[in-house]
Image: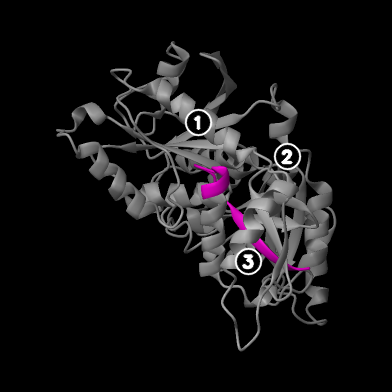
Amino acid sequence: MRLVAIVGRPNVGKSTLFNRLVGMRQAIVDETAGVTRDRHYGQCEWCGNVFSVVDTGGYTSNSDDVFEEEIRKQVVIAIEEADLVLFMVEAATGITDYDDEIADILRRSGKPVVLAVNKVDSGAKMFDSYQFYSLGLGEIWSISAATGSGTGDLLDEIVRKLPEDRQTAEDGHPELPHIAIVGRPNVGKSSLTNALLGQDRNIVTPVAGTTRDSIATYYNKFGHEFMLIDTAGMRKKSKVHEDLEFYSVMRSIRAIENSDVCILMVDARNGLESQDMSIFNLIVRNQKGCVIVVNKWDLIEKDSNTMKKYREAFMARLAPFNDVPVIFTSVINKQRILDVLDAASKVFGNYSKKIPTSRLNEEMLPIVGEYPPPAWKGKYVKIKFITQLPTRSPKFAFFCNLPQYVKDPYKRFVENKLREKFDFTGCPMQIFFRQK
């Protein structure tokens, strides 16, 4: 997934534009609350092009004493990670020293840059934006992030300048399943990678945050063949202090976006904590297959029902999407680590499963005929036809006469029936009701 970094000094409207590009506030604030710097990360889709957006704004707001040094550090790191830089300035204030400094760094970087002049919400203010040509960054795009004026043309320019997806270009095995190992710091992600590979491929220490980068390795053993990706640990945004760690987390998020199946590792001693749930929600939101691995199981005092109780507690936390395999392991003792591979392989099979339309209608039409959606204001919904959409993850379209009257509880009922009939364990599913 390509990455666009929004840079600029504080109070030029970066977060306002960011919320507009991502399209919905809940994608940043509610659904993934707790993921590191989650308020500054999201996905934007424009004319069929999907890319990630990161807002560096607010990251240096408390460093008044060393503001110049901090903003330079932030912009430099953002430029290194991003495929394109969206540089924001403000029309009314004009060119400040900070704007000049950032522009100088951008000119030297060689990265594609789009210059957006914000708060141009009237024709009179358009003249204030022309001074920014003197920054030497090419064409300027006058916008108002608050009202949305000019953002369509800005997005056209971003899409035009975005380079080809680096993941696709650099991946030596694009046809193989990509399995990412994700989780909080120090739950044993690198240890699991080393145990599966049978060699110390990644550095393992008791210090949280040892892994800084997302490391992809070709795996071909025990009848399994895929790309295995070890990622940096993702902790709550309040606990991230280093710039380097912030971008390690961004790479982990990009690893999730570019994977097919995610192995979410959890520490058995802590159970499913809020940060684990945030990462799980991120996996579900990106429509990726999921396997939960409960590591350090050897440190738990057990009786005959311990595993059953843990699994039930996990299912209660994960609801409504709790059709997920849970594997209890001890990586140190190499206990059940091959079960993790088997589960991931099975989930990938479900994830890429395509159900023939004839069989789908044969199985599902009698069910929706017997249990139709509830009537709404005296109007009855009749489902006529069902098909699976040609997408990477499981998505189904139900064609009916009044799709606007079908509510979420009925969608969940249909999803449960699909899972019951066709086994989509470990895969998030999307159901769409469309006008026939």
Colour scheme of the rendered structure: one colour
Q: Which residue is mark 2?
A: 108
| Amino acid type shown at disc 1 | Ala
> Residue 69, image x and y in percent?
51, 47
Q: Which residue is mark 1?
A: 344
Question: Dot 1 lies on which element?
Answer: helix
Magenta-colored stretch includes residue 426: yes
Residue 369 numbered tag: 3
| Amino acid type shown at disc 3 | Gly
Please tell me how crowded label 1 is: few (under 14), some (14-19), or many (20+) other residues with Cα within 10 Å.
many
Looking at the rendering, the stretch of residues picked out in magenta corresponds to: 420-436
Q: Is residue 393 above or below residue 367?
A: above
Q: Is residue 304 above or below residue 235?
A: above
Measuring 73% from the left and 39% from the top, which residue is drawn there?
A: 108
Numbered disc in front, either 3 or 1:
3
**Nearest to N terminus: mark 3 or mark 2:** 2
Question: Dot 3 lies on which element?
Answer: helix
Please tell me how crowded label 3 is: few (under 14), some (14-19), or many (20+) other residues with Cα within 10 Å.
few
